[in-house]
Amino acid sequence: MFKSEYLNRVYAEVERRDAHEPEFLQAVREVFESLELVVDQHPEWEAAGLLERFVEPERVIEFRVPWVDDSGRTRVNRGYRVQYNSAIGPYKGGLRFHPSVNLSVIKFLGFEQVLKNSLTTLPMGGGKGGSDFDPKGKTDGEVMRFCQSFMTELYRHIGQFTDTPAGDIGVGGREVAYMFGQYKRIVDRFEGGVITGKGLTFGGSLARTQATGYGLCYYAAEALKHLKNDSFEGKTVVVSGSGNVAQYAAEKCTQLGGKVVAMSDSQGYVYDPKGIDLKKLFDIKQKRRARISVYADEVPGAQYVEGCRNIWNVKCDVALPCASQNEMDAEGAKTLIANGCIGVFEGANMPLTPEAIALIQGNGLLYSPGKASNAGGVATSGLEMSQNSMRLSWSFEEVDEKLQGIMKNIYQACYYASVKCGKPGDLMVGANIAGFLKVAEAMMAQGVV
Ligand code: NDP
């Protein structure tokens, strides 16, 4: 499958051992396709078994999470933490609470996180965790009891110098706060840097909530400017999802002159030709925690369509997939291409199938992988940890300015790596290679560990 015998051998072994983990295999394959361009220049990697170690998580933790619902019934969920790679810093990566969570999903997210964190230039290794618990439809009391039980097991595996979780799908400010409270109670220490995405009154950073979505738009704006001499100004934009990343991607690209005409949730999408009313969206999603369909009920001229995958039928210049993995397949990509879209920038992790990526890149559209364009969230988590350590708080403007600088640097690192390996402008290859080289150097220096 790969030209390099070494890559073939390592991948075959991953496939043999983890045959039942499709998302994880997909993520490894994509990265190996990029490493193909550099692996022959580094015979020392094979001699040191570097890739064999790189694909294997340092530690996988799986645990029982028992909790009691409001009717007094005992429920049991499964919890995970994959501590993937600590070569360049303590493990860092979010927690996802969603019924689709399993080991394959957490391993693919952890694997991607290693490269993403490397790209931020901050000293953070990669990890990821979560549970198949579904916060939807649960009361605050149920969510609190679940989070407390989850942390009652997780606390022994984390710490500000060991592993520092954050949010992801289904884990926002409410869940992070419950988990932080339980951690603090168990260890009897106010260890702010143990988890990020905290509330502003107890060590959270201004602009962390906005960071992933804003960072995505900063990265996309940089690519549009550098590769197409263009911008968001006057562009029609489709943003999938309507959670944390999608909401703030929609806000920032609107501020940059774009018009967001469609957004979705897992049930369907709304189309508003006038441009999504962000105040209304925030009210529906942040205050009422309601379905996206409510938007069409309350905004004249907006339309609701069942089925979230069809959102790519809406004609746009720029597409920002911000919901979940594999949400855009070949059909979606073909429709975007036929409708004249010029760029697809991933806000979610691995939202495009390999077939969709091949079509998007093959037809000359700009494309950026999530591990580069959504790295603003974890980068700002890194800034939250810095503020916790220094016992001070930066202003919103200070954090936002640092975020813009980081996203610009990530873009440049991806672009220059793409040039160096003979594929100028291929930001996927650039992200994979730039992220990997730093981790590889640290792993080589630290010996066989
Ligand atoms: P949220 O839980 O806030 O929002 C998720 C959104 O995606 C919701 O609108 C949800 O709809 C929708 N969604 C979830 N699963 C599916 C699915 N299988 N098909 C279609 N839609 C789906 O999560 P975030 O916004 O935090 O995360 C979104 C993506 O961004 C994820 O891939 C995450 O890993 C990635 N990411 C997040 C970061 C962060 O800082 N939060 C950082 C970097 C990446 P519904 O409400 O109906 O479930």
Image (cartoon, rainbow, N blue to C red):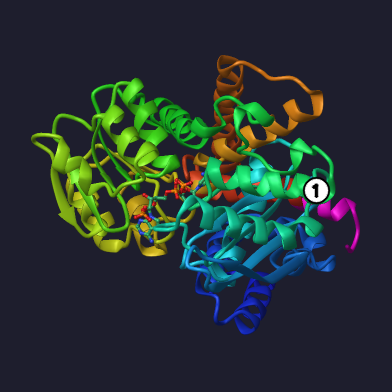
Crowdedness near tag 1: few (<14), some (14–19) or many (≥20) residues, C-alpha within 10 Å = many
The residue that mark 1 highlights is 159
Q: Which of 2 and 234 is in front in this view?
A: 234
Q: Which amino acid does label 1 sit on?
A: Gly
Q: Nearer the viewer, residue 123 or 78?
A: 78
Q: Quadrant of the C terminus?
A: bottom right
Residue 189, given in percent of the width and then of the height, sits at 84, 41
| Corner quadrant of residue 250 | top left
Residue 380, given in percent of the width and then of the height, sits at 62, 32
Number of numbered discs overlaid on the protein picture: 1
Residue range corresponding to the magenta coloring: 440-449
* Left or right of residue 143, residue 261 in this image: left
Q: Residue at x 64, y 31 (%)?
A: 204
Image: 375 above or below 204: below
Residue, far left: 301
Residue 358, given in percent of the width and then of the height, sits at 38, 58
Residue 186, given in percent of the width and then of the height, sits at 80, 51
Residue, far bottom: 16
- Asked if the stretch drawn in magenta spans residue 193, the answer is no
* Left or right of residue 116, residue 289 in this image: left
